[in-house]
């Protein structure tokens, strides 16, 4: 099987699994929102923002380090060195995961009362701290499977983990009384924490069997521990800064909304509508995209290790063009279905309004993830994280200014400003690193087709927030978009034949 066929086979497998999991997750998120309410989802979101920083510290860049170092070692035929890299990475993860777990557990009082301002989050933070070690170790073996192009193991683990999480969460919620927000949050994080243990044991067992089946031969220089630390720590330091700023941003959102005169319960509800409801809908299509972009990291690392920069430029050009076409199509469906999705999934009209407002930004958001994957594969992960830090710092500054003045709509503006800045800086760096061309027609045609589709659908099919309208808009809008693309690209081929 050729490398190209293997790449698309692996990507298709991950995309199928990811789509199924995202779909289940979206429906499950809708269910638990109905159980705990918007305020409960807001409280859970704040808890998870602190937990996200703890996970960043626990993993400390180890997954990317394993993926790139193992892929590069195998590209040079140094199989024995790849095995030693894996062992060194496991020790690295064990140390950072253990420290993160202890700090989160014993610091839960301070974090709950002083940082989150709600004592109800203390028990959830303590329970979440127990999952940091298995998460850190899982990152090692997940990175290994990406490096060796056997991503099916990761897919199996993700499905298993999702099933365990949902089962345990439903069981925990069944024990909670109505209105017990703290107990409901505890059930939600408890299911996730226990599922992480099961996920690690399954991933480790698969890695152990995989290494026995695929004997890695070839020498290579020593000092693998230094290589792992030298690669992972710069990524980790940048990730700490960015994750810390993102956590601060999330903590400030309800605070800044309250400065504008919004009650705390309503501020938590608005925060949940944006982060826990609208953004998962917007990011649902990235299940396909992230599956392929994640595979670009080892692909670029291996080609870069062999000095094939010309081939890398061709890959970047095709990846960006295909991503833009996919992203414009996704933005079209999200815009047309925004109202119906918000009402059907969450019974919340404001969710649909946020989805519709952010849908035009989707191409930028999706393209940025693909550009970042190329940069990481080429070894520019420090630059990429530097851009992300600047993005997060600007977000904090903008939140402090815009949210007290414009409320939740101000945060929509914050997302636009920071996403555009991040994308422009990342794309400029990739253009300097690789020689690749971007045909203007390939970007203009999808946009024109999407605008035509939206104009006709909005005029002919007013949104009523029901399933029938959603289906009609998707069918008519998708058909017009597809036919317009065929016409525009056929016209382009006709121009080329004339020339």
Image: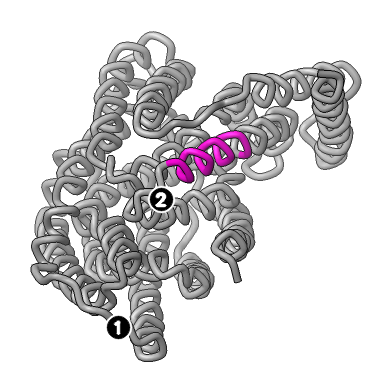
Residue 252 horizontal/vertical position (percent): 28, 28
**Please, which colouring scheme is shown?**
one colour
Which sits earlier in the primary sequence, circle 1 or circle 2?
1
Residue 227 shown left or right of residue 245 in the figure: left
Q: Could you say which disc has been placed on residue 255 in the image?
A: none
Residue 303 placement (x, y as % from top left) = 40, 53
Q: Nearer the viewer, residue 251 or 265?
A: 251
Please state the extent of the stretch shown in magenta in the rendering: 310-322
Dividing the picture into quadrants, the one containing residue 363 is top right
Give coordinates of residue 253: x percent, y percent.
34, 27
Q: Residue at x 55, y 25 (%)?
A: 361
Picture coordinates of residue 269, whole percent (x, y): 46, 34
Q: Quadrant of residue 428?
A: top left
Mark 1 lies on a secondary structure that is loop
Could you tell whether 107 is left or right of 148 in the image?
A: left
Q: What residue occupies the far front of the structure in this picture?
A: 499
Q: Give me the residue at 54% from left, 35% from top.
A: 317
Q: Mark 1–mark 2 contact, CB under 8 Å?
A: no
Compared to residue 341, the image places residue 186 above or below, namely below
Mark 1 and mark 2: Cα distance apart in space:
22 Å
- Helix, strand or loop status at disc 2: helix
**Residue 409 in the figure: left or right of residue 232:** right
Left or right position of 274 against 144: right
Residue 296 among magenta residues: no
- Residue 429 vs 8, above or below: the answer is above
For disc 1, the neighbor class at 10 Å (few under 14, some 14 to 19, many from 20) is some
In the picture shown, does residue 324 fall above or below 410?
A: below
Q: Which residue is mark 2?
A: 300
Residue on which the image places disc 1: 217
Mark 1 or 2: the one toward you: 1
Q: Can you say which quadrant of the picture contains the C terminus?
A: top right
């Amino acid at each position: 099987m050729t490398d190209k066929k293997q790449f698309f086979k692996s990507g298709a497998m991950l995309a199928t699994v990811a789509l199924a999991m995202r779909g289940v997750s979206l429906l499950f998120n809708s269910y638990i929102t109905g159980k705990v309410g918007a305020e409960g989802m807001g409280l859970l979101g704040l808890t998870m923002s602190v937990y996200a920083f703890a996970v960043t510290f626990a993993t400390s860049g180890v997954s990317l380090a394993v993926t790139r170092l193992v892929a590069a070692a195998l590209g040079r035929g140094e199989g024995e060195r790849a095995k030693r890299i894996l062992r060194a990475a496991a020790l690295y993860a064990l140390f950072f995961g253990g420290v993160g777990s202890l700090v989160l557990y014993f610091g839960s009082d301070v974090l709950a009362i002083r940082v989150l301002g709600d004592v109800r989050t203390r028990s959830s933070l303590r329970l979440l701290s127990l999952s940091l070690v298995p998460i850190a170790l899982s990152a090692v073996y997940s990175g290994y499977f990406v490096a060796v192009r056997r991503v099916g193991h990761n897919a199996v683990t993700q499905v298993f983990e999702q099933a365990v999480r949902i089962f345990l969460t439903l069981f925990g919620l069944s024990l909670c009384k109505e209105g017990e927000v703290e107990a409901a949050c505890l059930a939600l994080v408890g299911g996730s924490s226990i599922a992480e243990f099961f996920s690690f044991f399954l991933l480790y067992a698969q890695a152990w069997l995989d290494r026995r089946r695929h004997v890695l031969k070839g020498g290579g220089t020593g000092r693998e521990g230094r290589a792992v630390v030298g690669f992972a720590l710069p990524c980790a330091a940048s990730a700490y800064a960015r994750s810390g700023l993102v956590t601060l941003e999330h903590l400030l959102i309800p605070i800044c909304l309250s400065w504008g005169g919004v009650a705390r319960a309503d501020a938590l509800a608005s925060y949940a509508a944006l982060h826990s409801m609208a953004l998962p809908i917007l990011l649902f299509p990235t299940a396909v995209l992230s599956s392929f972009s994640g595979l670009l990291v080892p692909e670029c690392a291996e080609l870069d290790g062999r000095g094939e920069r010309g081939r890398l430029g061709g890959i970047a050009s095709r990846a960006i063009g295909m991503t833009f076409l996919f992203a414009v199509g996704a933005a079209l469906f999200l815009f047309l279905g925004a109202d119906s999705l918000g009402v059907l999934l969450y019974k919340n009209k404001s969710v649909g309004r946020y989805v519709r407002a952010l849908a035009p930004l989707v191409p930028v958001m999706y393209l940025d993830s693909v550009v970042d994957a190329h940069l990481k594969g080429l070894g520019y992960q420090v630059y990429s994280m530097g851009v992300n830090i600047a993005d997060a710092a600007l977000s904090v500054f903008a939140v402090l200014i815009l949210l007290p003045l414009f409320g939740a709509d101000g945060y929509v503006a914050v997302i636009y400003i920071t996403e555009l800045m991040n994308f422009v800086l990342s794309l400029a760096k990739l253009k300097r690193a690789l020689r690749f061309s971007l045909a203007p027609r390939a970007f203009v045609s999808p946009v024109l087709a999407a605008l035509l589709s939206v104009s006709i659908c909005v005029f002919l099919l007013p949104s009523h927030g029901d399933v029938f309208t959603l289906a009609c808009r998707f069918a008519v809008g998708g058909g017009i978009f597809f036919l317009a693309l065929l016409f525009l690209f056929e016209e382009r081929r006709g121009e080329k034949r004339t020339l």
